Structures are given as structure tokens and as C-alpha cells.
């Protein structure tokens, strides 16, 4: 993320950057709360994280859609847009790891295996 961000700092801005702030704030909150839930052994905090994962997915999907439209309109931005797509995907993966920690906390505290229970793909 840092390498691609440093590269992008010296280039013209692209669409979807406002969404990156929202995405990054969601991910940061999920990571901090997953650690908090583990330290406190708090399943309620962990369950909140599971619900937050959907918002991250929505933001990443919207970023992806906006960047695809922008690349179709202007192929010159494709290299920069790909960097942004990779950053968005990596942020989503961080959120997925926070979700995994939350699932483990719920198992630790309640003895319930909730993995994939909130995942529409697993249904």
C-alpha cells in the first residue's frame, strides 16, 4: 500500500479518492476494535466487526466501479487506476483479517463457530 501510495503522490489525482478516506477509516476502526475485542475478550465488539465488513466491501466495490468507468473514459490513467485498485483490495484484505480475529474472539468467548455465517458467498 505504501509503495503504491508513494508512487501516486507525484501524479495527478484520480476519482474515488474521497471514498478511500471512508474505506481507510472503516478498516482502521475494524483493526483497532478487533484488537480491543481480543484483549477484553468481548464478543459484542467482535460481532460489531462482523457487521462492519459489509460496509468495507461496499466501499471497495464502489471504488472499483468508479475507476473502471474512469479507465474506459481515459485509458491514459490505467496505470494509476490499477495502483488504486490494488490499494483498495489490500485495504479490504486487512479488514478481512480483522474479521477473522473477531470470529476467533467469538469462538474463544462463546464457543460458537461463526466463520462464514455472515458471508453471503458461503450461503
Image (cartoon, helix red, strand yellow):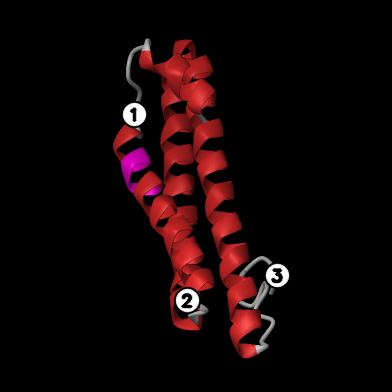
Which one is nearer the viewer's eye here, 100 or 57?
A: 100
Residue 68 sits above or below residue 80 on the image? below
In the rendered image, the residue lying farthest to the front is 39
Look at 64% across and 72% down and name the residue there.
104
Locate residue 118 relative to residue 10 in the image: left or right. right
Is residue 60 part of the magenta span, yes or no?
Answer: no
Give residue 122's mark.
Answer: 3
Q: Which residue is mark 2?
A: 40
Distance CA(mark 1)–CA(mark 3):
32 Å
Q: Which residue is mark 1?
A: 15
Considering the numbered disc 2 on the image, is that residue within a helix, a strand or a loop? helix
Quadrant that contains the C terminus = bottom right
Q: Main secondary structure of the magenta part?
A: helix
Give the number of marks: 3
Considering the numbered disc 3 on the image, is that residue within a helix, a strand or a loop? loop
Which one is nearer the viewer's eye here, 53 or 1?
A: 1
Residue 38's spot in the image, x, y percent?
53, 70
Considering the numbered disc 1 on the image, is that residue within a helix, a strand or a loop? loop
Residue 88's spot in the image, x, y percent?
50, 39
Residue 11 sits above or below residue 55 on the image? above
Which of the two labelled residues, at mark 1 and mark 3, occupies the earlier sequence position? 1
Look at 48% across and 29% down and name the residue there.
84
Is residue 21 part of the magenta span, yes or no?
Answer: yes
Start and end of the magenta stretch? 19-23
Which one is nearer the viewer's eye here, 12 or 71?
A: 12
Is any atom of residue 25 visible in this view?
Answer: yes
Residue 90's spot in the image, x, y percent?
56, 40
- Characterize the local packing of mark 1: few (<14), some (14-19) or many (20 or more) Cα atoms within 10 angstroms: some
- Characterize the local packing of mark 3: few (<14), some (14-19) or many (20 or more) Cα atoms within 10 angstroms: few
Look at 61% across and 72% down and name the residue there.
103
Residue 94's spot in the image, x, y percent?
55, 49
Residue 6 sits above or below residue 63 on the image? above
Amino acid at each position: 500500500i505504501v509503495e503504491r501510495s508513494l508512487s501516486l503522490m507525484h501524479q495527478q489525482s484520480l476519482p474515488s479518492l474521497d471514498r478511500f478516506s471512508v474505506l481507510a477509516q472503516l478498516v482502521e476502526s475494524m483493526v483497532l476494535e478487533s484488537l480491543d475485542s481480543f484483549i477484553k475478550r468481548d464478543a459484542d465488539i467482535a460481532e460489531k466487526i462482523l457487521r462492519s465488513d459489509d460496509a468495507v466491501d461496499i466501499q471497495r466495490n464502489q471504488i472499483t466501479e468508479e475507476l473502471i468507468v474512469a479507465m474506459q473514459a481515459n485509458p491514459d490513467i490505467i496505470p494509476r487506476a490499477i495502483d488504486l485498485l490494488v490499494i483498495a483490495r489490500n485495504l479490504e484484505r486487512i479488514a478481512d483479517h480483522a474479521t477473522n480475529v473477531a470470529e476467533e474472539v467469538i469462538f474463544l468467548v462463546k464457543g460458537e463457530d461463526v466463520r462464514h455465517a455472515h458471508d453471503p458467498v458461503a450461503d
